[in-house]
Image: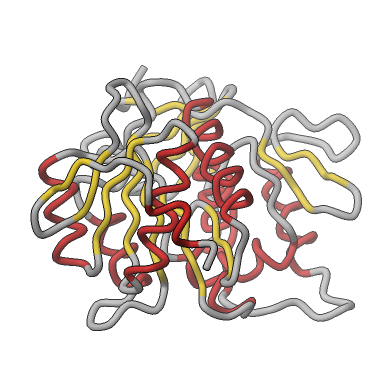
Amino acid sequence: MYLNRLYTLGYKSVPGIGYHGFMENQDHILIVDDDRDIRELIGAYLQKNGLRTSLAANGRQMRAVIEEDTPDLIVLDLMLPGEDGLALCRDLRAGKHKAIPVLMLTARNDETDRIIGLEMGADDYLPKPFAVRELLARINAVLRRTRMLPPNMQVNESVPMLAFGDWRLDTVARHLLDADGTQVALSGAEYRLLRVFLDHPQRVLTRDQLLNLTQGRNADQFDRSIDLLVSRVRQRLRDTAREPRYIKTLRSEGYVFSAAVTLSAGEP
């Protein structure tokens, strides 16, 4: 079986948890999957391609690895026994390790699973079965996107303002502040949409993804509610569809928030 030729690669054992590569200054990837063959295959392939890996079979082992040696990215299986991947991802996003990127593995090619995974905070998803080459490419893509953000983009509950262009978003009061400090009110739907864009800058989001992330439902063929909502948010930002500064339309793909996003401590 083709798994065997990958198992011959060298590992450094971490008792009770998993394995690490030998070299320093490598990106550290934590693989969480209850299937031993799958997690060892992934670990071997990633190590062969220059990454350092740790393996975990469940949420308890995952937390132990994170506390000992924080990974640069977590590959997280959705269908884990006990605490499943969605619950673990939600807990990660609510705790002190909320900034770690997560790539979710799903056992089914189910749009609902993928949308829920994104809603829980996953940065990308990949349905099983998959080619390990594609997984490696997606890992590298997520790491690149993460590192495009400024160094001060660590999520921090003590910094409630997100700044972009001439605007700041108060994530506690849920309103906008312009360059002069004037408040601009947002509806609940407008806030949710803008927050999704600010949490995923420079990332193409389809209409279905935006609708699910903001409203928890799928779009039908003639559903243009998300387009109307984007138009309303553009008006709040004093942006235009013809020459957008913040929200750009990509024909046949969706939308992308093109401005840089940083954290702001509050008053300028």
Residue 263 higher or lower than 42, as above or below: above
Q: Residue at x 66, y 68 (%)?
A: 211
x and y percent of residue 216 in the render? 56, 76
Residue 96 higher or lower than 119, as above or below: above
Q: Quadrant of the C terminus?
A: top left
Q: Is residue 53 left or right of residue 216?
A: left
Q: Is residue 81 left or right of residue 104?
A: left
Q: Is residue 68 left or right of residue 219?
A: left
x and y percent of residue 118 in the render? 51, 62
Q: Residue at x 20, y 41 (%)?
A: 12
Q: Residue at x 78, y 39 (%)?
A: 248
Chosen colour scheme: secondary structure
Which is nearer the eye, 128 or 205?
Answer: 128
**Count of numbered circles in the view:** 0
Q: Residue at x 26, y 30 (%)?
A: 22
Q: Which image quadrant is residue 41 in?
A: bottom left
Residue 103 higher or lower than 107, as above or below: above
